[in-house]
Amino acid sequence: MPPEIIESVSVTPIPSSYQKELGKNAYADNRGTQWLEWVVRAKSSSGAEGITIANRFMRQGTVAKLLEFLKGALLDREIDALLEIQNGVVTGPAPGMERWYRRNGWLSILAFDLAGKTRGVSAIDLLGGKKHDSVPAYDTTLYFQDFLVPERGALQVADEAAVAVADGWKELKIKTGRGGRWMMPEAGMRRDIDVVLGVREAVGPDVKIYVDANFGYDNHLDLLDQFIGEVTPANIFWFEEMITHDVDGYRAMREMQAKYGSKALLTCGEVDRNPISEVFQDMIDDGLIDGYQPDVVSHGFLGWMEIELQLAGTGVRSIPHNFGNGSFGTFASIVFGAASETHVSLEDERILPHFLTGQPDFINGAYTLPTGPGLGVDIDEAGFAPHAKHEFRVEA
Ligand SMILES: [Mg+2]
């Protein structure tokens, strides 16, 4: 059999739509109703196609630079020369590929997809096989919705939480940290508390609630202490980025937790661009965090395989960040989560389906696993067609 070669690569910016308008978070203004997925498609000589998104690259990149990068990384390359695979499991980059994946972990997801599709095996198996039969997911769209509908205030967030639960969601994340920028610190803390308690009241005791402040309590440990004290009776499952990663700050948070009897996980790490970097490693070594959150697509499957090797035995669980990765991110996260022993929950933007096939079933708050080869998803050509005029392609 002739070797499978990558014969064409293309880039297409495709907007993805949220189910509603998303408001502010602690540091950024309104997110709006849409975001972009920089879709990368790579076709092999037999017609197999690997998919990923290059959102990380395109934060500073241009289409021209991205195409040049993809040409060097993929074009004319044998699919067997993308990944090192032993006994059906990926063990690392194939020789010569390290430099292409190093700052562009998202590319490794395409490699898993193509390798899986040409071998007829799931990327879950390439990652070492499934550890769970489904992947729980949480609604991550409860932004500062109170600013969008000021007359409803905190109740607006509670209303939207109730809608999410009616839609089948059993886990929700609430953005907090209003006093970091958009309100006076104390008033912001008060609103944060009203929002969290209001959501708990609206959704009942069985829904898991996560709280994310995007560092909104920096320099206000006194207010954070009060916040943790008042929301702890609402049974919070994790506190994310309440303050910037820092050993002393997280030690102080552990003391607050002990004082109020909070069993919540402390999580952070989505901003770690070179995981696991020193301060995070220090916090892990000192037992100050319980969940680590570098982005699932930016770091990709190879990046996360390395992260999990380093986390092994620490008790710190994998909770990859996924916000901004759109519909592709959901599929990538399901595959990664299925194969990760310590995975907690998938961050879901609940993008309306548009350019990918095979929307996974969402049952009892969890996604069922894909059954097809690779990521188990393909481009839906009918959904892609309206965007094809913005597709740029290089061919061998
Ligand atoms: Mg976050």
Image (cartoon, rainbow, N blue to C red):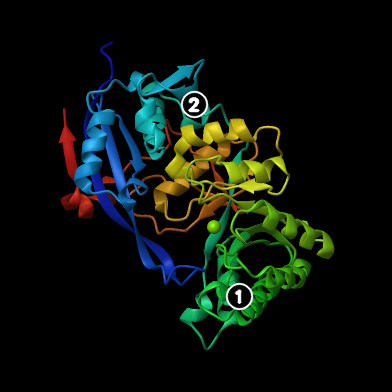
Q: Residues within 10 Å of mark 2 (few under 14, many from 20)?
A: many
Q: Where is mark 2, residue-wise? A: 126
Q: Please provide percent x and percent y for residue 57.
A: 33, 46
Specify whether 152 is left or right of 380: right
Q: Is residue 318 visible?
A: no
Ligand 1 falls in quadrant: bottom right
Residue 167 or 116: which is nearer the viewer?
116
Q: Nearer the N terminus, badge 2 or badge 1?
A: 2
Q: Residue at x 28, y 39 (%)?
A: 41
Label 2 secondary element:
helix
Q: Residue at x 49, y 83 (%)?
A: 149
Specify whether 65 is left or right of 32: left
Q: Where is mark 1, residue-wise? A: 158
Q: Please provide percent x and percent y for residue 353.
A: 38, 55
Disc 2 marks a residue whose amino acid type is: Leu
Disc 2 beta carbon < 8 A from ligand 1?
A: no
Q: Is residue 393 visible?
A: yes
> In the image, which disc is placed on residue 271?
none
Q: Which quarter of the rendered picture does the N terminus lie within?
A: top left
Q: Please provide percent x and percent y for residue 176.
A: 59, 69
Specify whether 40 is left or right of 289: left
Disc 1 marks a residue whose amino acid type is: Ala
Q: Please provide percent x and percent y for residue 92.
A: 47, 24
Q: Which quarter of the rendered picture does the C terminus lie within?
A: top left
Q: Determine the residue located farthest toward the bottom in the rendered image.
A: 151
